[in-house]
Amino acid sequence: MSVDEIKKLIRDIPDFPQPGILFRDITPLISDAHGLAAIVDQVAEPWLGKVDQVLGIESRGFIIGAPVAYRLGVGLTIARKPGKLPYLTVAENYELEYGTAALHVHQDGLAGRSRVLIVDDLLATGGTAMAAVRLAQKLGGQVTGCAFVIELSGLRGRQRLEPVVCSSLVQYD
């Protein structure tokens, strides 16, 4: 599936979650069988044989991360909002373009897995992804890369994540 075909399945929602934010909604993309298969295969392809574990970021990172992990033949660790994981966690606070938040991972979530791929639906300013990078590093993981479906290149999140290698399927200014 081409970039243009993927973009046609991404819905723009203005002023969500607050005025001035243009939300890129992947639900039409993932509800399309060909769209879902294409993004899973295309997100996974550059990372085949290069990672030991996928770290999916809540919540759309779970949707993409689980089949990507399956495609790569590795497991999935999840990074969740506070209070959502039942076991002992490690936390990382971060800033969003419209507020602050935190991510938690089970303290044993990356045990014995050195090469980590962080997966999420969208890269904006890089705050959420950088929090996931720091969490993986706290747990002893080496972040091999970050993979996204969408990148808002004008917000320079990729630069914030350097030197971590990032891949994305579609970019918007």
Image (spheres, helix red, strand yellow):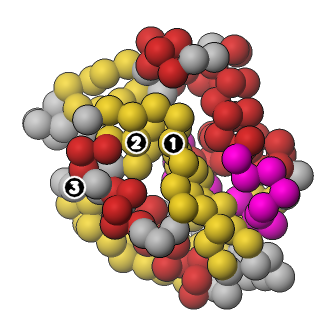
Please give the residue where the numbered disc 2 appears in the rendered image.
151
Task: Give me the C-alpha separation between circle 2 and circle 1.
Answer: 6 Å
Residue found farthest to the right: 73
Query: Residue 106, how many percent across, how many down?
Result: 65, 76
- Tell me the quarter of the image containing the N terminus: top right
Residue 15 is left or right of residue 62, and the answer is left
Instruction: Depth check: give the residue in front, 3 or 88.
Output: 3
- Secondary structure type for disc 1: strand
**Residue type (three-letter) at the residue carrying disc 2:** Glu
Disc 1 + disc 3, Cβ < 8 Å: no
Q: Residues within 10 Å of mark 1 (few under 14, many from 20)?
A: many
Q: Residue at x 34, y 57 (%)?
A: 157
**Residue type (three-letter) at the residue carrying disc 1:** Ser
Q: Which residues are magenta?
A: 46-60
Please give the residue where the numbered disc 1 appears in the rendered image.
168
Residue 135 figure quarter = bottom right
Please give the residue where the numbered disc 3 appears in the rendered image.
97
Q: Residue at x 72, y 24 (%)?
A: 37
* Front disc: 3 or 2: 2
**Residue type (three-letter) at the residue carrying disc 3:** Glu
Residue found farthest to the left: 19
Q: Is residue 114 magenta?
A: no
Reply above or below: 19 against 160.
Answer: above
